[in-house]
Amino acid sequence: MTQTFILQNHDNHFFGKNKEWLDGYDANSLFKTIHKDEAINQMVEISSKDYKQRVKIIACELDEKGLPIIDIAIMPAPLPKAPKAAKNSDIPEAIIDLFAAETADIDSEEDDEHDDDEGVEIIEFSEDPLAESEDTQKPLI
């Protein structure tokens, strides 16, 4: 077995390959390197982007699959799983395009409704602000 280096922050989460913080239960998705200087460079890069992060380097042994063996004492609580997006592969593409076209038609109809002048009262203003009409009241002063 050989040694590898992984990164852990102050919340006990581990740095992943996709530059996100993970709970470490999927060891395959963790950032790991056999070079300590590469781990230090990554730690400095993380700290420079977010000065609130307190990152430390942890040396781990590798198992037979080449994955780091993490001590259970330093493992955080599991992060909640993100809901999986619905697969569109089960829905035929023609139906997806149909819904997209209907949505576009509805949006354009709503815009057209606001353009019509039906049912809109047109207000006309006179140049004389004190001109009397049936709709206006006399000034109180």
Image (cartoon, grey):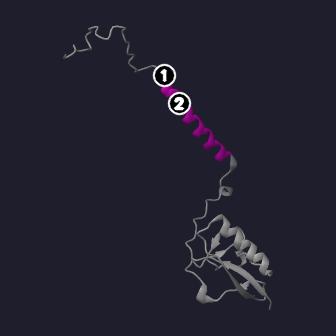
User: Which region shows up in magenta?
Assistant: 94-115
Q: Is residue 16 above or below residue 136?
A: below
Q: Residue at x 57, y 81 (%)?
A: 76
Q: Residues within 10 Å of mark 1 (few under 14, many from 20)?
A: few
> Toward which corner of the image does residue 56 lie, by quadrant?
bottom right
Amino acid type for the residue under numbered disc 1: Asp
Q: Nearer the viewer, residue 98 or 103?
A: 103
Is any part of residue 26 visible from this angle? no
> Toward which corner of the image does residue 66 lie, by quadrant?
bottom right
Q: Nearer the viewer, residue 81 or 92?
A: 81
Q: Secondary structure at mark 1?
A: loop
Q: Which mark is residue 111?
A: 2
Q: Give the quadrant of the N terminus.
A: bottom right
Horizontal arrangement in the rendering, residue 135 relative to residue 45 (left or right): left
Q: Position of residue 137 (x, y in %)?
A: 23, 15
Q: Secondary structure at mark 2?
A: helix
Q: Is residue 70 above or below residue 39?
A: below
CA gap between label 1 and label 2 equals 9 Å
Residue under circle 1?
A: 116
Q: Position of residue 19 (x, y in %)?
A: 69, 68
Number of residue marks: 2
Q: Residues within 10 Å of mark 2 (few under 14, many from 20)?
A: few
